[in-house]
Amino acid sequence: MDRRIKKTKNEIKRALLEASNSKGIEQVTVQDIVDHADINRATFYYHYKDKKDLVASIENETLEGLIQNIRIQDGQFNSLEDIVYHPILATLEHVKSFEDVYKILLSSNGITNFCWKMLDTIKSSLSDNFELLKKKNIVILNDKSYLVNFIAGAHLSVIIDWVNNGLESDPKILANHMAVILTNGVNVKFN
């Protein structure tokens, strides 16, 4: 892709995200975007059909990047904790790397169905990762569909809370906490 085209598209995406900070993504208009990007409407429409097309482009790029990061390769794990920890850490690091995008997409001003798309992405990746366990003759005794839903739901819930609280926790510490709870259960001490 031509460098100028890539730069213009990035400016348009940045403009949408900036305008969304104050108005919410649903309320942002194409005029708001072109004003923030300091381009004319023709330039916007040269690259995108409409705002919906732009939003879809941002969603797709974000989720595709997430998928690439959370897939583990055969040989990168030795236990269930590895299957859980590495994708969680990769997800958290991806979110941290693109925090400006996730802060908008996962906020109350964001895109309503993005959370569901992200949940489906995490579930799909988990299912693929569990298939790798089968190849190593490691059998999960729990119902896999419930386990995938439980882990993905918990994972996304923690991510949303983490993003909405300013990504304060270190991704490695957060991933470790999540992996330990998911693989060892909740630790309790009675006094």
Image (cartoon, rainbow, N blue to C red):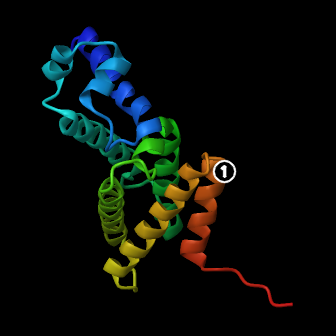
**Is 45 above or below relative to 64?**
above
Q: Work out which residue is located at the far right of the displayed protein and give it.
A: 191
Residue occupying the point 35% across, 85% down: 143
Image coordinates of residue 17 in percent, x first then y, are: 40, 33
Which quadrant would the C terminus be assigned to in this image? bottom right
Q: In which quarter of the image is residue 149?
A: bottom left
Q: Left or right? Give the position of 18 relative to 184.
A: left
Amino acid type, label 1: Ser
Image coordinates of residue 131 in percent, x first then y, are: 30, 67
**Is 73 above or below relative to 158?**
above
Q: Left or right? Give the position of 60 relative to 98.
A: left
Which residue, given by chain and number where applicable, does mark 1 sit on?
Answer: 169
Mark 1 secondary-structure assignment: loop
Q: Work out which residue is located at the far bottom of the displayed protein and give it.
A: 190
Residue occupying the point 60% across, 46% down: 167
**Is 21 above or below relative to 159?**
above
Image coordinates of residue 154 in percent, x first then y, are: 48, 69
* Nearer-the-camera pick, 105 or 2: 105
Residue occupying the point 28% across, 13% down: 39
* Nearer-the-camera pick, 165 or 151: 165
Residue occupying the point 39% across, 53% down: 72
* Nearer-the-camera pick, 78 or 21: 21
